[in-house]
Image (spheres, rainbow, N blue to C red):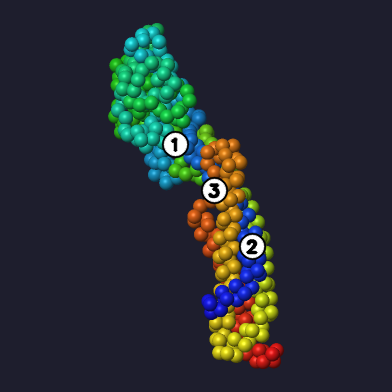
């Protein structure tokens, strides 16, 4: 049957080529559209993922948050990282380069812990270590491994008291972590500065252990969602719980909406085009069966089984689908190349605006082949139902 089916296709090669081109004409735009969806959405998603703050959620109003809350947040699979923070007013400190007395720089203190997405690759820090932003490092004139003097001043009983903390610069923070003067420190350091300003810590006090620090209530938190999709849901849940937060939930939700809308657009166009093509293919195969009714009857009269006659349109439909899909992929690759060159660096940065992959090509071939076989079933049943006597009566 394979030899017979391909011989028949070669005999009517012009019709076969027209059918394959019709398949490619419908499938190629769909592949390009899907590639555009993948390229644009993947580019925007990658841009957000490369920004470590895209998944960050920070509380913006001071509250009294008990340790139990942080335990629940740490156990939530949607949260990849969470660290408590102190009050914003107490989270500033004056840094000074010992080699430049009198040239202090006031920076913001941000809490950090192992696994902080803002500081990738950093392990646990010692209480006497800072990770400084590049701007702070430059203004202080110190290098990684150097020493800075951190100080906090307060007025108590008419006397000025100062808490001095000699600190080592462990590393410089990535530019994406902070664009302003920032010092990342362990939670005990932030608690010490807060307690000193509140008057509950002496000028010679030093940071407690991390385990002891986590047993206290905190004014807020800084966390990172495990996935972009988790950001809007977490943002909404915190607001419903009365905790005001700052995040990029709107930008993430916009990206997810774009992804859904493009998927709906693709499915609508693909559905309309695909159904139209399958109907036309099925009608064409049915017409071929009717046109070759006498030939099929003679084959049945010569002893060809009904199952073999049923397979004839299926084999030819599969051949049309495979050739058409390969032509469609070749056309789509050419169009994608032109689009990527035309929009290089303007829409998705250096990433392709139309992204075509091998799995996508395999899926296109598989879906086209399956659809063609389904469309050919009725024609195959019709071919198998041709009675052998029809060959004699029409002879």
Q: Which residue is the extreme one toward the right?
A: 394
Is residue 41 toward the left or the right of residue 69 in the image?
Answer: right
Residue 17's place in the image compared with 64, above or below, is below
Secondary structure found at label 1 = strand
Q: Which mark is residue 223?
A: 1
In the picture, residue 289 is in which quadrant? bottom right
At 64% from the left and 81% from the top, the residue drawn is 382
Badge 2 local density, few (<14 within 10 Å), some, or many (20+)? some
Secondary structure found at label 2 = helix
Label 1 vs label 3: CA separation? 32 Å
Q: Are circles 3 and 2 on residues that touch, CB within 8 Å?
A: no
The count of marks equals: 3
The quadrant the C terminus occupies is bottom right
Q: Is residue 105 visible?
A: yes
| Mark 2, residue position | 21
Residue 258 percent across, percent down from the top left: 60, 46
Foreground residue, 390 or 259? Answer: 390
At 55% from the left and 86% from the top, the residue drawn is 305
Badge 3 local density, few (<14 within 10 Å), some, or many (20+)? many
Residue 66 percent across, percent down from the top left: 40, 35
Badge 1 local density, few (<14 within 10 Å), some, or many (20+)? many
Residue 218 percent across, percent down from the top left: 41, 30
> Which of the two labelled residues, at mark 1 and mark 3, occupies the earlier sequence position?
1
Residue 138's place in the image compared with 364, above or below, is above
Question: Which is closer to the viewer, label 1 or label 3?
Answer: 3
Label 2 vs label 1: CA separation? 54 Å
Q: Which mark is residue 58?
A: none
Secondary structure found at label 3 = loop
| Mark 3, residue position | 355
């Amino acid at each position: 049957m394979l030899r017979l089916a391909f011989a028949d296709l070669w005999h009517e090669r012009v019709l076969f080529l027209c059918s394959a081109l019709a398949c490619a004409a419908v499938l190629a735009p769909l592949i390009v559209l899907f590639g555009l969806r993948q390229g644009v959405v993947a580019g925007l998603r990658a841009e957000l993922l490369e920004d470590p703050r895209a998944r960050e959620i920070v509380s913006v109003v001071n509250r009294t948050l008990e340790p139990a809350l942080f335990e629940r947040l740490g156990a939530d699979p949607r949260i990849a990282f969470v660290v408590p923070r102190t009050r914003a007013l107490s989270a500033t400190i004056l840094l000074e380069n010992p080699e430049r007395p009198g040239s202090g720089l006031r920076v913001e203190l941000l809490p950090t812990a192992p696994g902080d997405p803002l500081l990738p690759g950093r392990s646990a820090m010692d209480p006497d270590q800072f990770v400084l932003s590049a701007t702070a490092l430059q203004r202080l004139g110190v290098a990684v491994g150097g020493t800075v003097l951190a100080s906090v001043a307060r007025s108590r009983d008419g006397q000025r008291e100062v808490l001095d903390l000699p600190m080592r610069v462990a590393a410089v923070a990535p530019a994406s972590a902070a664009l302003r003067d920032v010092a990342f420190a362990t939670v005990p350091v932030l608690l010490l500065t807060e307690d000193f300003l509140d008057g509950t810590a002496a000028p010679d006090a030093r940071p407690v252990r991390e385990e002891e620090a986590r047993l206290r209530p905190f004014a807020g938190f800084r966390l990172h969602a495990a996935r972009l999709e988790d950001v809007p849901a977490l943002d909404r849940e915190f607001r419903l719980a009365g905790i005001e937060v700052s995040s990029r939930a709107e930008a993430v939700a916009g990206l997810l909406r774009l992804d859904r809308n493009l998927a709906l657009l693709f499915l609508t166009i693909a559905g309309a085009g695909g159904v139209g093509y399958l109907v036309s293919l099925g009608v064409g195969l049915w017409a071929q069966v009717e046109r070759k009714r006498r030939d099929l009857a003679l084959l049945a009269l010569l002893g060809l089984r009904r199952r073999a006659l049923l397979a004839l349109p299926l084999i030819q439909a599969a051949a049309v689908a495979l050739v058409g899909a390969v032509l469609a992929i070749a056309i789509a690759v050419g169009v994608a190349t032109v689009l990527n060159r035309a929009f290089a660096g303007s829409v998705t940065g250096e990433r392709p605006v139309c992204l075509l992959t091998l799995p996508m090509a395999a899926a296109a071939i598989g879906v086209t082949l399956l659809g063609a076989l389904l469309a050919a079933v009725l024609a195959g049943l019709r071919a198998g139902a041709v009675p052998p006597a029809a060959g004699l009566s029409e002879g």
